[in-house]
Image (tube, grey):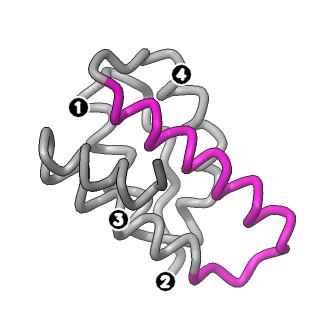
Amino acid sequence: NTIVDREASINAHNSQLGNALKQGRQAIEGLQIDPDEKKELLSAYGKLTEEVAKEKPKPGLVQLFWNTISTFTAKAAPLVQIGVLLAQAFGIIAHTAAPKT
């Protein structure tokens, strides 16, 4: 079950979140950051999409994975929208930094 498959599953339940997750993944893949950081970021992102795709996602885990991802919101603008949508859907604290222009 790949991240893309989970995004499609999420999209069936919440199209806004599914689309935001797809754009976020693309933004992460395009980031020019340390390869080890990118690996950790993609790992947290994969865990986030896996949790959100579950029938009953655990808000605590969504928050945990988002906390790692949110440290990069200033570098990848699409991640900000994901934080907003996760906050709406799961009541997490988004902790998003405005993207640098």
Q: 99 or 56: which is nearer to us?
A: 56
Read off the residue under disc 4. 61
Q: Which residue is mark 2?
A: 101
Please tell me which of labels 2 and 1 falls first in the chain: 1
Report the Cα–Cα distance between label 3 and label 2: 22 Å
Identify the residue under disc 1.
88
Tell me where the magenta segment starts and ends, as one range: 30-54
Name the disc covering residue 40, or none: none
Q: Amino acid at mark 2?
A: Thr
Q: Kindly check if marks 2 and 4 are in contact, taking CB atoms under 8 A apart as contact.
A: no
Query: In the rendered structure, does residue 31 fall within the stretch colored magenta?
Result: yes
N-terminal-most mark, 3 or 1: 3
Dot 4: what SS? helix
Instruction: Determine the secondary structure under disc 1.
Output: helix
Q: In front here: 52 or 9?
A: 9
Magenta stretch contains residue 21 = no
Q: Residue at x 56, y 70 (%)?
A: 28
Amino acid under label 3?
Answer: Lys
Q: Secondary structure at mark 2?
A: loop
Horizontal placement of 29 versus 50: left or right? right
Which residue corresponds to the image point at 31% horizontal and 16% vertical from the top-left? 56
Marked residue nearer the N-terminal end (1 or 4): 4
Residue at image position (19%, 51%) is 11
Earlier in the chain: of badge 4 and badge 3, it is 3
